[in-house]
Amino acid sequence: AKGAGLAEAGDGGTMLKASPAPSKPPRLVASRFAMLTRFHAGYFRISLALSGQALLWRTLSDRSTDPSALHPLVQSLPSAAFVLLWSLALLTLFALCVLYVARCVVRLPAVRAEFRHHVGMNYLFAPWISWLLLLQATPFLPPEAPSYHMLWWAFSLPILVLDVKVYGQWFTRGRKFLSMVANPASHMTVIANLMTARAAAKMGWHEGAVAMFAVGAAHYLVLFVTLYQRFLGSDSLPAMLRPVFFLFFAAPSMASLAWCSISMSFDTGCKMLFFLSMFLFASLSLR
């Protein structure tokens, strides 16, 4: 009887412990919020890769491309494959943007912390770079269309706003501020300006393309010299982000493409930037 009483007491205790069943939905909601907390702008690297591949495919399939390149190989593939790749990049970028907007609503303090972080701030340029890549690679919209111009403004204005914020800090926070916060991920700001210049050149706006190229080139020189000198405290990049060192050759290669679109020819300046990017790529690969 005593054992039965203990069993009943144990069952009652179990029932009392198991009674708060409605606590599962809050846990589920909390887990979803935790996912939004772990999500950050660095995930837009996925959309950057897919959008870059879509633009590469579009460039190789263009009739103005040198026939001695991979043009015959790309032409042998079905055209639906390029549309599928472009659609996949678009859906991926749209999904990432929706997640980040949800993070801004639910985890606004985390977004503010990322906005102030010397590494995370640079990845806020990544979604707008991805949109500009997809805009230039789109098979459905010619650069002369008014909607193309409207989309260019929609994707370029956030880059200009972020430029004012980032470069304003470089100018006003003291002479040692840039040397303390500069890191290889800072090349994202330069690449965003150069990508904007290339898109402007494609739609025929020569002055806007030259202006954005000048801003990007000027700050690339400052950033390159700062990173090359390696001031004390500038080596503040986490170990998991070491692959962003390859952005060293992404900036001059993007500058080569942008200037080629502006000058309408692969002239000496484009070749200089291209060979510089190849040299930096070889240097990083051997290290």
Image (tube, rainbow, N blue to C red):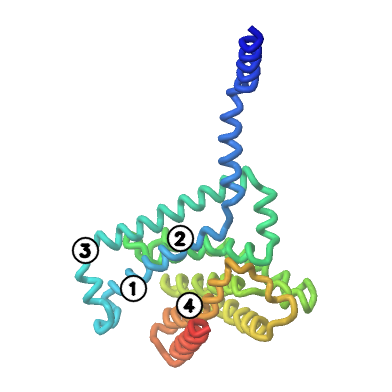
At label 2, the amino acid type is: Ser
Picture mark count? 4
The earlier-in-sequence mark between 4 and 3 is 3
> In the rendered image, which residue does mark 1 sit on?
59
Where is 138 relative to 64, above or below? above
Query: Which quadrant holds residue 78?
Result: bottom left
The earlier-in-sequence mark between 1 and 2 is 2
Q: Position of residue 275 (x, y in %)?
A: 46, 89
State the CA–CA distance, disc 1 to disc 4.
14 Å
Q: Could you say which is closer to the camera, residue 124 or residue 230?
A: 230
The earlier-in-sequence mark between 1 and 4 is 1
The earlier-in-sequence mark between 2 and 4 is 2
Answer few, some or many: residues within 10 Å of disc 1's Cα (few below 14, many 20 plus, some between 14 and 19): some
Q: Secondary structure at mark 1?
A: helix
Q: Could you say which is closer to the camera, residue 158 or residue 87?
A: 87
Which residue is depicted at the point 66% across and 48% down?
108
> In the rendered image, which residue does mark 2 sit on?
47
Kindly report which numbered mark, 1 or 3, lies closer to the viewer in this rendering: 3
Q: Position of residue 52 (x, y in %)?
A: 41, 68
Q: Secondary structure at mark 2?
A: helix
The outermost residue toward the left is: 76
> In the rendered image, which residue does mark 4 sit on?
254
